[in-house]
Image (tube, coloured by chain):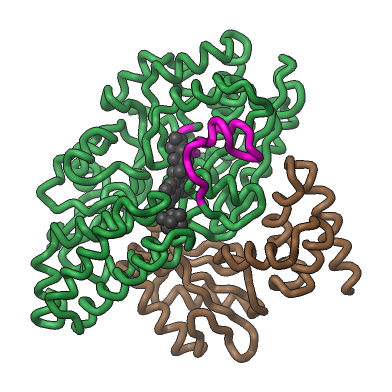
Chain colours: A brown, B green
Amino acid sequence: MENNNVKTIRDFIEREKKSYASIESTVIPALHEAEGVYGWISPEAIEDISNYTGVSKAKIKGTATFYAMYKNKPMGRHLIQLCTNVVCMVMGSESLLSLLNERYELEPGGMTSDGRFSLVIMECIGACGTAPAMLVDADYYDNLNEKNIFEILDKYQ
Amino acid sequence: MKKVLLKNIENPDSALLTEYMRVGGYKNLKSAVKEMTPRDIIDDVKESGLRGRGGAGFPTGMKWQFASMDPKFPKYLVCNADEGEPGTFKDRPILEKNPHLLIEGMVIAAYALQCSRGYIYLRGEYPQAKVILESAIDEAYKKGFLGDDILKRHFKFNLSVYQGAGAYICGEETALIESLEGRRGQPRIKPPFPVNAGLWGRPTIVNNVETFANIPLIIEIGPKSYAAIGNTACPGPKLFSVSGCVKRPGVYELPMGTTLKEIVYEHCGGLVDGRTLKGIIPGGLSTPILTPDKIDCAMDFVNLPKAGSQLGSGAVMVFDDSVCLVKVYERAMKFFEHESCGKCTPCREGTGWMRNILGRIECGRATAEDVDTLIDVANNISGATFCPLGDGAAGVVLAFVNNYRDEIDYHIKYKKCC
Ligand SMILES: Cc1cc2nc3c(=O)[nH]c(=O)nc-3n(C[C@H](O)[C@H](O)[C@H](O)COP(=O)(O)O)c2cc1C
Ligand code: SF4
């Protein structure tokens, strides 16, 4: 299992590095890849990337923590990324946040006790014309309201 | 006006190469590569008057000329698809529905600037766009519009997508370059400018998605006809992403210089019935808010500064009288605080202080002196930050306080919204 993960990341870096003049450029794509493999940016993920890029673990960790979208801790099976920036706020994302809290006891940055959902609040996700909006995993949903948000989330078990 | 940037997007298959070619796609690339020298293209882009659509409005032809004058090779071409400015969603339809228009624009640019390698820096928040762009790039390789021998003219250009991971500051071009090199996205000092020392120290041309999407049109109709579209000082078609309290929010392609009034009341159907206009942010969250009396202002790089704001990314955010602007600016400051890269103190600390004070005003715990402190903090940030993010945050607070002092005072006095 472990070895498969290592191999996936090594092969990924080997493939990717041809696209750049410096292998360090593969760190950000490799963090995306490692997140898919390990589920989050685990110490093993950082170790693997460091081993195959030669970039120090400290530096990789510094990079991983700079970017808001990397999962720096284990998360639920599905990630709800709800936009709360100005337009989504004006169009009602705050009441959606309270509903998520009521229904699933889910706080921003938290996870449901059954591990089904994690919730993070997002800065603008570029859906202001159809606000409020969210991403669930890699799927976009917009024009959310107090009813359809749960119909959508029911699809994610 | 016939749509150019959003051409054919009602077609559900508009992102496919066959559909793009059916409406004349890649024809301009062919004529550029076969009939024009790189120098001709740069001259035409200069003459067209095109100004960058990413926010700063720098003349594109001039940027290209600077890059082409630098003797260092290789040169890199980078598309800024970070689109992080709150309120902005105008690059998304190009990326998702018209990716070949962007690719065609980039290949023409690569030919003009003699770049053999390009990257599209795409924000992490657009996962579908990544899939669509990568499939479009594949199609373009298969057709010989990308690769080592484009259109059999011995011209080489390879292109790939680089996915960001959620950092607004990576839209700033030097932070973007740091990120592309695999590091934290913190801006670099300028000069040197990217056109001379960018990616891996090489000349690098960074342009916005919409900027590249304008290039095929300049080739097609020629610089003179292009310059006749919209405002002569900064011509061309422009995408406006309109959101907030209007009946029909969305992305509109209109000539540069269309008035705010026309955008809000004609194209977007005006406000919800019974509401009155309170304020408009014309160019994304980092541009100063305008009061309703500025509604006749033309949306372009020349007229908005005269009215006290900026065109920015053309993201029009409309607020009616149901919206509490103190709350809007508290949230805005939370954004800038969160997105400050931390490199310089006035921005890193100051954005948090401003958020704090606005939060106190919003929840009714502020005194009149707090407003003076807010102004003082903003004044001390202005002009003292390493990149425009901090400056922008201070600027929007000052514009808000200047224009909406009554609303702020009401909050302080009555401890509630007016
Ligand atoms: C804080 C900050 C964020 C920016 N975000 C973006 C962005 O998301 N997209 C973009 O194209 N330009 C953005 N810019 C502007 C870029 O630095 C740069 O000017 C632009 O990409 C140049 O392309 P253009 O000349 O085609 O506009 C940003 C600038 C700053 C200071
Ligand atoms: S102004 Fe803010 S974002 Fe820009 S370099 Fe300074 S801390 Fe970073």
Left or right position of A143 against A72: left
Residue A146 in which image quadrant: bottom left
The residue nearer to you, when weighing A73 against A126, is A73
Q: Quadrant of residue B259?
A: top left
Residue range highlighted in magenta: B187-211
**B105 vs B376, nearest the viewer:** B376
x then y, percent, for residue B96: 54, 46
What residue is at 54 percent from the left and 58 percent from the top? B125
Reply yes or no: does residue B137 show up in magenta.
no
Residue at (47% x, 74% y) in the render: A149
Q: Answer with left or right where residue B21 lies relative to residue B265.
A: right
Q: Which of A24 and B409 is in front in this view?
A: A24
Is residue B258 positioned above or below A3 on the image?
above
Instruction: Examine the structure image and report whether residue B203 is included in the region drawn in magenta.
Output: yes
Query: Which residue is situated farthest in the top direction here?
Result: B35
Q: In which quarter of the image is ligand 1?
A: top left
Looking at the image, which residue is at 38% across and 72% down?
A93
How far from the left and from the top, in percent, is residue B300? 27, 35
Report if residue B10 is visible in the image. Answer: no
Between B111 and A115, which is closer to the camera in this rendering? B111
Q: Is residue B338 above or below residue A22?
A: below
- Where is residue B342 shown, x and y percent of the image? 47, 63
Looking at the rendering, in which quadrant would you find the N terminus of chain B?
Answer: top left
